Every structure is written in C-alpha cells, then in structure tokens.
Image (spheres, helix red, strand yellow):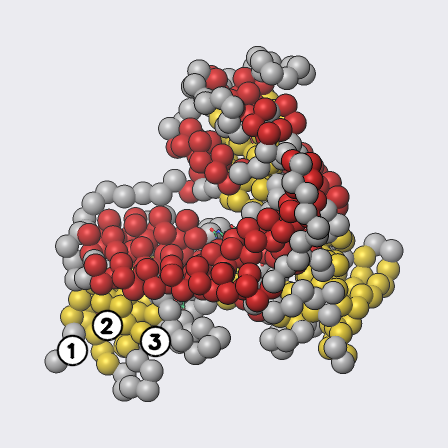
Amino acid sequence: MSRKFDVVVIGAGPAGYIAAIRASQHGMTVACIDEWVNRDGSNAFGGTCLNAGCIPSKALLESSELFHRAEHEFSKHGIQHKGVTMDIAAMQSRKDGIVRQLTGGIAGLFKASKVEGLVGHGRLLADKKVEFTAKGAKPETIEARYVVLASGSVPVELSVAKFDGKRIVDSWDALDFDAVPKRLGVIGAGVIGLELGSVWNRLGAEVVVLEAMDDFLFMADREIAKEAAKQFKKQGLDVRLGAKMTAAKVKGKSVLVDYEDKSGKQSLEVDKLVVAVGRRPFTGELLADDAGVKLDSRGFIEVDHECRTSAKGVFAVGDCVRGPMLAHKGSEEGVMAADLIAGEIAELNYNVIPSVIYTAPEIAWVGKTEEEVKASGRAYKTGSFPFAASGRAKAMEQTAGMVKIVAAKDDDEILGVHILGPMAGELISEAVLAMEFSASTEDLQRTIHAHPSLAEAVHEAALAVDKKALNFPNR
Ligand code: FAD
Ligand code: NAD
C-alpha cells in the first residue's frame, strides 16, 4: 500500500521547507522530499540558500569585511596592531559550521513539526502522485492531496566558459576556495559578482569583473548605482562595463579570457574565473510527461498569482517560478501556497519585495526606481539624505552612501526607497513595512526614530522629500 500525505513538497530550500512547516501548522500530514548532495557526499536540507548561497556568502562577507576593517580602519579608532593576517582555513571552517548548524536546524524543525523529511529524488506523476526514490532504493509511489513543487534553480553555464570545478567555477565553488587567488576574474557584475568579488578583493585578490551591459547595476536606481560604482572603484574592484566575453580557456594554472568592449578585442589572464551570469529554473527529472504541469518559454513552471500550476492541486513556489530569485520571495510564496491549501485567504504583494546586495556599503531597495516612476508618467518628488550627515554613521566610520525616497506628487505615497550605506539591508525593512501599508512620506516624517541611529537617515530622507530635512541643507 502506498503512503499517503495531505501535502507532499518537492524541494527543501527556503521555498519548500517553509511551505512544509506552514502546512504542518495547519494540522496537515506533510512530507518534504529533497535530494541535495554536498561536495563531501552528505545530504542536507536548506537548498541553495543554506548550503551554497545566502548563508555561506554572508558568512564570508562578514569575515572578509572584518579583515578589511582591521587592516584599513582600526587605526582610525586608535587601535594599533602589527599587521593582521587571514587564516583562510579557519574562515572556511567557521562558514561550514554555520551552514551545518542551520541545515541541521531544518531537520530539527521537521521533526518538531512532524514533517516527514525524505532524502532522495521526487518526481510528479499524474493525479498528484509522487514517485520518491531514496538513494540506492527502488522508486516508491506516494499519494498526496496537494503537491508543492519547489525545485529551485541552478547557475547558468556559458558555452564559451564551461565549468571545470577548479579554474572556471560557479558561485558554489567560489565560496569554497581554500586560498586567495592572486588574480580573480568574474563574469557578470550582478549580485553574486559583486558580493563574491568583494569577498576575495578584501582578502587580497586582484579582481576584474566583466559585465556585458553598459550600465552598472541596471536594475537599481541610477543615482544609487552611480555612487555604488564610485565606492567599489575606491575599494579596488575593477568593474569593466560593456565587456562581452568571447572565450575562456584554461592554460596551465591560468585562465585566458577573451572579451570585446567598445575599444575592440581585449584579453585577460586570471588564476580563477567565476561565472556569475544569472541562474535558471531547475526542473530536471521533476515532471512525468502526464503530470499536467506546463513550463513557460524560459523553463519556469507556469503559475498564476497564487502559485497554482496548470495541474489541479499542484502549486509551485520559489526560484522555479517567475519573479525575482530571492529566498524571502520563495519563502513567502511557500507560506501563501500552504495557507491556500488549508482553505485560507492568502496573497503576496509582489510590488514590495526588498532587494539587498550585501557589499560594503550595502545596497538595498524596494519599489520603483526614479527612472521607472518617470517612465510611468506619474508626477513625483524625491528626497535624499547622505550618511555623511548621520551621527551614528560617523561614529561607525561608515559614512558612504545615502537614503533616497521617491514619492508621488499628488498623494505623497512612497513609491520607492533606495539605500546605499551601512546596514542598508536592515534599514530597508522600515520602507517595506511603510509601503505595505501604503504609507506617505508624511507618515515617515511624523514617526519617531531613535537617536542616534542609522534609521534617522530614512526619517531625514522622508523629510527631504518636502524640503524639510533638519540636519542637512534642503535642495
Ligand atoms: P533552492 O534553494 O534552490 O532549493 C531547491 C531544492 O530542491 C534543492 O535542495 C534541490 O536539491 C531540491 N530539488 C530540486 N529538484 C528536486 C527533485 N526532483 N527531487 C528532490 N529534490 C529536488 N537570495 C536572497 O534572498 N538573499 C541572499 O543573500 C542570497 N544570496 C545568494 C548567494 C548565492 C551565492 C546564490 C547562488 C544565491 C543567493 N540567493 C540569495 C538566492 C537564493 O539562494 C535563492 O533565491 C533561494 O535559494 C531559492 O529557494 P528555493 O527554495 O526556490 O530553491
Ligand atoms: P544577476 O542576474 O544578478 O547578474 C548577472 C549579471 O551578469 C548581469 O549583470 C548580466 O548583465 C551579466 N551577464 C549576463 N551574461 C553575461 C555575459 N555573457 N558576460 C558578461 N556579463 C553577463 O545574476 P547572479 O549574480 O548570477 O545571481 C543569480 C541570482 O541569485 C540573482 O537572481 C539574485 O537575485 C540571486 N542572488 C541574490 C543575492 C542577494 O539577494 N543578496 C545574492 C546572490 C544571488
């Protein structure tokens, strides 16, 4: 007799494991299938985010930033030292420990919530049946009332720069380097390129980032992107725009990269090359021919605004469906799917998903850029406040950047908030909450912010929208 569950989730990344836990909170019987295999052959829940993405990258960003500050900033505080050195093995083992703790934590959460965590491959058959194959075992058919697909994404591989796992690598390998490469090439100045480029640059690598687009951080507000580019240049990150790679070949211990920019053919020799040109949805061996789930032209699982697929009772969430490939977006979709399955009303406001790039300074935004508002034709006003005028930022020795708010001229509604600066990824939550409640800049202006705090910069930017900033001349 086949096992039966109310809900079977395929994929235990941040989208899938959260869907499973929420479904169990509704009193449903739940199984969550995941096949993730780490480099050492071990299995772990948590998907890309915990094993090879958000968490390990943030651990390395923290370590490398502390090293950088010790080298370049401590003396300003009067802290004298006779040179600092970095123990890469210790840095990597701290990172691995954090990953182990958190992925083990999901197994613990499953146990506590009575979610059956199944290690192996899941494949959706017709009529909400799922074929589960544990390693080395025969396939077993599991029956479900509802299925949630959360199979995630994988890095895009370029035909002109095939991954070899040693010299031409993806972001996962770039998180695991056991030594600082002397010369590091990065293809793509997107989120991964900037975050991992920063890590290895701070630790001493000469980093060259080749970006095909002419605009730096094309998805961000132009003013913020321009200022961020200035800061990265100061840090020694060599970002070359309009650079189209034509070939990358391993030669001995080097990688020879050919690319073209507006001055013509160029070449670059590096010790390692990280290719970070985006990720694609992963649906390998996920769907039987008669599963009834449609994919769109780019390979994403087709879903409606409630994450329902074309097969009745089958939902899909996270990186394998449309929308930004972000852990928090996937998790909230997982919650929505589980709530809908439980018969509750649930929806997700896709207009207020925050984006954060964890460089130093951090870059964070929510809502529309000034350029997008301008293009929409809606009359608008803007206000900004530099961290150079913030007492807290000065005390922290982190005065680069600003908070910028774009608001509607007619009803003062906040349309977008853009932050370049210390803890931007934390500060943006206030803006997300404000926008979720359709707040006006006046609402922010009249909200009391603690002093001295970085959040005062958000307050002052809101005041600046109406030329009422108190700690900076209004323009
Ligand atoms: P995934 O996390 O990819 O999980 C999918 C899981 O499903 C995997 O474990 C996979 O093995 C499993 N699976 C797939 N198919 C099957 C099958 N048929 N059977 C069984 N199991 C299956 N996002 C942020 O929001 N913030 C960040 O700071 C951030 N940093 C990142 C840094 C890096 C270097 C990378 C690469 C990504 C980063 N991301 C970040 C993106 C984030 O990791 C993804 O958006 C997120 O992991 C997507 O979650 P998911 O659950 O949809 O998919
Ligand atoms: P990305 O889409 O952020 O950036 C890819 C960059 O590569 C783009 O700027 C693109 O123009 C460029 N590019 C594409 N093809 C190129 C080529 N042939 N030559 C040179 N440049 C080229 O993708 P990513 O950095 O690989 O990240 C993948 C996903 O992971 C993103 O969608 C992101 O949301 C997610 N992620 C998020 C975070 C975070 O939230 N902090 C961190 C890392 C990754």
Q: Which residue position is annotated with label 1?
A: 2
* Amino acid on which the number 3 mark rests in the picture: His
| Disc with the residue nearer the chain's start (2 vs 3) | 3
- Label 3 element class: strand
- Label 2 element class: strand
Within-10-Å neighbours for mark 3: few <14, some 14–19, many 20+: many
Name the foreground residue: 387 vs 214: 387
Question: What is the total number of numbered labels drawn onto the structure image?
Answer: 3
Q: What residue is at 51 percent from the left and 40 percent from the top?
A: 425
Q: Are marks 2 and 1 in contact (CB under 8 Å)?
A: yes
Some atom of ligand 1 lies within 8 Å of the CB belonging to the residue at label 3: yes
Q: Position of residue 222 (x, y in %)?
A: 66, 37
Q: Position of residue 361 (x, y in %)?
A: 62, 41
Q: What residue is at 45 percent from the left and 22 percent from the top?
A: 449
Q: Which residue position is annotated with label 3?
A: 121
* Amino acid on which the number 2 mark rests in the picture: Lys
